[in-house]
Amino acid sequence: MLSFRCAKLSPLLRRAGPLVLLGALSACSSGPAPTTYDLSAPSGRIRSAIGAQLVVAEPAAVQALASQQILVRDAGGTVSFLGASQWADSLPRLVQARLIHTFENASQVRAVARPGAGAVADVQLISEIRSFEVQTPDSEAVVQISAKLVADQNGRILAGRIFTARVPVAAIEGPNAARALDEALSSVMLDIVRWAAGVSLPTRPEENPAT
């Protein structure tokens, strides 16, 4: 991994044009690339089957949660980010993908997809990431997601619930924080799948094939 030490610019660089100098200063500020962490999709099965075709929308999130950074919040509500650590994608997109995978892994859903995938939806799962952070001084990973099941044909909210999980964090640094947040998210996603399976969901009538 490249690093740069530029305590003093050479006379040659000082006489160079502004673009060359800007490039040199940019290189001086370069440091190690952040370590990237992924989130996993649990493979737990559920007993009930979901007969509806489900579309999982990308979760809404406030700006602090809508990035790749790993968020830390102290007791006073001050937000900071773990340096040299990031998620593999923006958090809402990553949570959407893993939630779809969790439904698929449950093997009890007729069809699940993301919007724009060409699927005709019976129901949409609309959600918001309310918390996805390490909280200090309690050293806990906290994930909270609100979810609503919405009938696609008329927009009626069929059911809604808030899901929360807390997992202890061994140390406030990248690997431990990512591991605990991943565990908390897995718990929340399994709860969402079980909850959705217990809601009576409308389905579109099957089209008769042309004869």
Image (cartoon, rainbow, N blue to C red):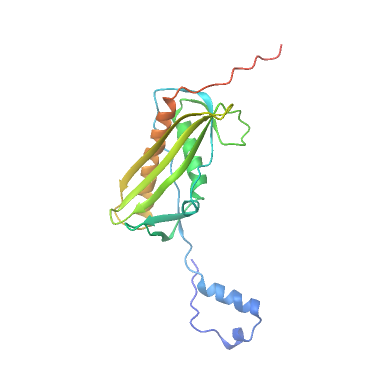
**Residue 109 appears in the picture as rendered:** yes
Specify the quadrant of the image occupied by residue 146: top left
Q: Does residue 52 sit above or below 102 in this rendering?
A: above
Q: Which residue is drawn at the image coordinates 47% and 34% (left, top)?
A: 148
Identify which residue, 57 or 160, lies in the foreground: 160
Single out the residue that lies furthest toward the top.
211
Specify the quadrant of the image occupied by residue 189: top left
Percent x, y for residue 67? 50, 53
Single out the residue that lies furthest toward the bottom.
11
Total marks in image: 0
Question: Is 196 on the left-hand or right-hand side of 166?
Answer: right
Q: Does residue 32 sit above or below 24 in this rendering?
A: above
**Residue 43 appears in the picture as rendered:** no
Q: Which residue is drawn at the image coordinates 62% and 36% (left, top)?
A: 116
Percent x, y for residue 133? 39, 51
Q: Does residue 206 sit above or below 84 in this rendering?
A: above
Percent x, y for residue 161? 41, 34
Q: Does residue 68 sit above or below 45 in this rendering?
A: below
Identify which residue, 109 or 81, lies in the foreground: 81
Quadrant in the picture for the C terminus: top right
Percent x, y for residue 4? 50, 74
Identify which residue, 69 or 40, lies in the foreground: 69
